[in-house]
Amino acid sequence: MDACLPATWLGMGLPPDLAPTLTEEERYGLSQLTEQLIRQRVSSAQCEQRLSRLIHPLDSIYAHVGGNRHEHRLALKTLIAEMNQRQTPWWTWSENQWHQVLGASRSEFSQRYHIPERRGPRGRLLLLICAYLTGNFSAFHHVGYLSQVALAKRVFGEAVFRTALRTVATEMRQMGLGKALVKQGMPQFLAYVLLLAHSPNLRDITTSLLEQARYQIAPTYRRVCAVLSRTLCRLGILAQPLTRSAWAGSYRCSGVNDTASPEWVSWCDRWRATSTEAPQTRTNKYMVLVKTGRWLAHQHPEVTRPEQWTRELALEWVATVDRMVVGEWTHPATLIPSHLKGKPIMPNTKATLLAAVRSFFLACQQWEWIPTRFDPRRTIITPRSVRILRGPNPRVIADEVWAKLMGAGLTLTAADLPLHNQYFRFKEAVEEDPTAAGSLSQLWYPFELVRALTLTWLFGGLRANEIKRLRLGCIRWQAPQRSSAANSPDKQRVPSEPVRQDQVCLLEVPVHKMGKAFVKPVDRLVGEAIDT
């Protein structure tokens, strides 16, 4: 970097003396202050007196983006320690150097600089802003969990960012898109794109920026990219939206396959293009195979082709999956909640990972792509200890809790149900004209339907998917068995006939994903609620 002021810093009142080298006085001051500052024996004022040229740009950025003094002090300590080690000003650092400073996660940053993890993200965010404003860093997908919205608000200003977001959200609502997509997915993705564009102006977004953001951001937000491109087309900013073919190819980008061997990824692409399984199934298995490629690149970099796998390597992969934890061998930009990261993965997840790799090798052998060196059905199997844990694990409900549920279900009234938003919207009109209340649907669903579902859940003993498949006329009333003719269909009650107290209520459950159709006796309350 030359001595002129970077364009991204214009308007912040920074000094023009941004030389790319340190003076002898600055080197001496850094060496003297590093150890003392880490031990908290020197104040920020003393640092500024000795290293004003190096610290004043940080102060100007801090004054521009806002924050607290503790955040500023953590960032100052980190910059002084790193400048002393690298012997260069912080505005000359490359993207790789900034990545080493910021770390791949919050915990890595806190451990590197011996900062409590609850305080580390504050100083790390200010450092990330400094790296971004220098123009030398934009690899946000390599720093772990990051709120792009918080970063964009501090860089561009909260009011400016909200204006851009409001413009996009208004157009999305006019397109008929749901509130969940507008409020949850779009803000993060839009903030990421604006940061890549180095501008809060929507007209600075281009198709290439959208492609870059889609390749780099976490897979959770990738589906929003196509929606944003269509929205920008309606606003007249883009000429045409992103194509579906380009979206389908995003799983083969370097951002997703990051550390996996390119040769291994090419085999995965070949399998995905040949397989006849459902599209979503192929995608899920493909991501598992890429995860396997990351493990191979780290543990066995010499193995880049499926034909190089042996029985011993397959058994090692089974053991790795059995001991795998949440977040291990995943994409660096994947958003993982902190309370789940590092915990063992669930038994169903283990079985899914092993099944994907097993089907991959079975297909490669059956299609004669590779020689048969081992039997995947006998080698890459789910361990018995995992299969046992995959069984049903019903939750035990305490007696007092179940008593409350029973009481609430038996005494359920229409006043207990939530009202539709339309009722509140026209509430004043209804108060003025009570006759208009009949035209408003106050409840989301008829009360009789909700009561029937409630009693079926309480007394039916059915799974959720079984309740969803119940049809009209699923109740049969059968008299007690007094003779062989009593069981014939001709003797069953006609719906129009009154129900006798000695009749048994039978519930007909149709065919579902877990088994065949069956009939079971249930409490009379269930039958009466469904019949009404």
Image (cartoon, rainbow, N blue to C red):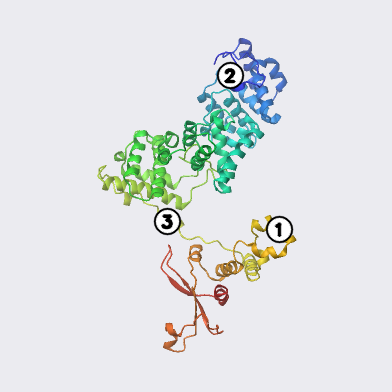
Q: Are marks 3 and 2 in contact (CB under 8 Å)?
A: no
Mark 2 / mark 1, whichever is N-terminal: 2
- Residue at (65% x, 22% y) in the render: 58
Amino acid at the residue labelled 2: Pro
Question: Visible in this render: residue 476?
Answer: yes
| Gap in angstroms between the C-alphas marked 1 and 3 | 56 Å
Which is closer to the viewer, label 2 or label 1?
1
Amino acid at the residue labelled 3: Arg
Mark 3 / mark 2, whichever is N-terminal: 2
SS assignment at label 2: loop
Residue 254: name its quadrant.
top left
Amino acid at the residue labelled 1: Lys
Instruction: Provide residue 269's location: percent of width, then percent of height.
Output: 35, 40
Residue ID for mark 2: 6
Residue ID for mark 1: 427
Viewer-proximal residue among 190 and 461: 190
Q: Quadrant of the C terminus?
A: bottom right
Q: Is 286 displayed left or right of 346 in the figure?
A: left
Instruction: Provide residue 426's location: percent of width, then percent of height.
Output: 69, 57
SS assignment at label 3: helix
Q: Residues within 10 Å of mark 3 (few under 14, many from 20)?
A: some
Q: Which mark is residue 387?
A: 3
Q: Residues within 10 Å of mark 2 (few under 14, many from 20)?
A: some
Number of on-image labels: 3
| Gap in angstroms between the C-alphas marked 3 and 2 | 59 Å
SS assignment at label 1: helix
Above or below — where is 399 with respect to 374? below
Instruction: Provide residue 216's location: percent of width, then percent of height.
Output: 48, 35
- Residue at (51% x, 66% y) in the render: 467
Viewer-proximal residue among 37 and 50: 50
